[in-house]
Image (tube, rainbow, N blue to C red):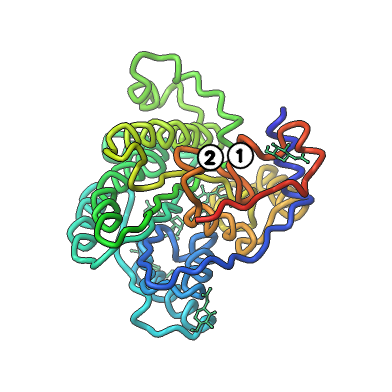
Amino acid sequence: MGWFLSFLYSQLFVTLSKPSEDFTGQTIIITGSNTGLGLEAARHISELNASLVVLAVRNESKGAAAKQSILASTGRHSSSIEVWDLDLQSYESVKAFENRVNKLKRLDAVLENAGFMTKYFRVVGGFESTITTNVISTFLLALILLPKLKESATKFNTKPRLSIVASDLHFVAKFPEGKAENIFDVLNDEKSAIMSMERYAVSKLIVVFGVRELSTLMTQNAKSGFSEVIINCLTPGACRSGFDRESTGAKRFIFEIMQTAIARTTEAGSRTLVAGVAAGEESHGKYMADFQVAEYVYTFPNFLYPGNKTRLSQ
Ligand SMILES: NC(=O)c1ccc[n+]([C@@H]2O[C@H](COP(=O)([O-])OP(=O)(O)OC[C@H]3O[C@@H](n4cnc5c(N)ncnc54)[C@H](OP(=O)(O)O)[C@@H]3O)[C@@H](O)[C@H]2O)c1
Ligand SMILES: *[C@@H]1O[C@H](CO)[C@@H](O)[C@H](O)[C@H]1NC(C)=O
Ligand SMILES: *[C@@H]1O[C@H](CO)[C@@H](O)[C@H](O)[C@H]1NC(C)=O
Ligand SMILES: *[C@@H]1O[C@H](CO)[C@@H](O)[C@H](O)[C@H]1NC(C)=O
């Protein structure tokens, strides 16, 4: 229950300051940035002078509209934003991303924000579609982008970051499949699958575990003893976006009440995405909430001292 108190506390009492990191000279890719948290994070990062923001989206016209919306509010030059095609439910699309990325002069950060929840059981690319989108393609993309991030680290003597958007809901995953010998086989069993929130929570729990595991491998493989690239994940908290697109009736009603009572705006929530993608070494392999590594957020007795917070800096 500890996480739930922290979550409520965060939703009701924490004010997230407006991001002020300087992204001058940086190239940053943001997935699912045509709407919601991704769009608002892209707007901040563009406003904070990123040289190039790549909106990686599955619908070109929605991407073009997002680009216009950002340019209109920031007044930045049109060439500072590009819209690239990326559909996480197609491995071909994810792999095609690699060629484009390799043509970039540099890559400073990646914000893997695109995510999905559904009540329908469908197998896409060999896995249940929530898992395909939030886990398989998300990590496939990470592995495809890591070499470019590493190359930039060496060339420009910088510390590139890869940040994945997880969720507080990973705490509620029951995840009975986790006990199985082959977890992904069991997740593919339609008869035992509990969809919507449970499946979504499982996908985000695997993200948290995956980030932990990958960060360890990256550190072990680094000659310097420090990973060349920082990888972390984060929760934006509950935000009023179009994320729950399918629920109807009583479920929708409860959801709407929850949203009105406790949720943040997508702009406020997006500040946590900017903090994730700007975070330093201390976030490597970690899950962040409210700008901090969450293992240290509101754990007793710090819960009583909400003023005791240090923002992770780059
Ligand atoms: N809102 C919350 O309260 C909350 C809380 C915790 C975590 N999160 C996480 O925050 C992230 C952003 O969510 P949001 O609230 O901003 O929701 P949203 O408004 O629904 O945005 C989701 C984004 O992901 C994209 N996307 C979904 N499936 C995709 C696919 N197969 N390929 C490429 N892009 C895909 C969507 O594209 P389309 O517009 O084309 O569908 C959209 O751009 C997600 O990872 C979500 O799990 C949200
Ligand atoms: C971005 O650039 C503008 C114009 O040069 C400058 O006024 C502003 O302070 C910069 N912002 C940051 C965060 O560096
Ligand atoms: C892309 O979005 C536009 C505008 O919402 C919509 O009309 C169109 O059908 C979408 N295209 C695809 C391929 O989903
Ligand atoms: C603030 O947090 C740090 C890190 O958790 C802890 O070491 C320190 O004692 C805390 N200070 C106060 C006044 O609670």
Q: Quadrant of residue 140?
A: top left
Dot 1: element: helix
Q: Quadrant of ligand 3?
A: bottom left
Q: Name the residue beneath numbered marker 1.
A: 294
Q: What is the crowding at mark 1: few (fewer than 14 residues within 10 Å), some, or many (at least 20)?
A: some
Q: Of the residues shown, which amino acid type is indicated by label 2? A: Tyr
- Name the secondary structure under disc 2: strand
User: In the image, residue 93 lies at what x, y percent?
Assistant: 24, 54
- Between 69 and 281, which is closer to the camera in this rendering? 281
Amino acid type, mark 1:
Ala
Q: Residue furthest right?
A: 304
Q: Quadrant of the N terminus?
A: top right
Point out residue 136 in the picture as x, y percentages from the top left corner.
33, 39
How many marks are shown on the rendered structure?
A: 2
Labels 2 and 1 touching (C-beta < 8 A): yes
Confirm whether residue 57 shows in the render. no
- Judge from the rendering whether residue 181 lies leftward or rightward of residue 261; answer left or right: left
Q: Is residue 136 above or below residue 63?
A: above
Q: Residue at x 23, y 66 (%)?
A: 104
The disc, 2 or 1, on the residue closer to the chain's N-terminal end is 2
Q: What residue is disc 2 on?
A: 287
Where in the figure is residue 75, as x and y percent of width and height?
Answer: 49, 86
Locate residue 90 relative to residue 196 in the image: left or right. left
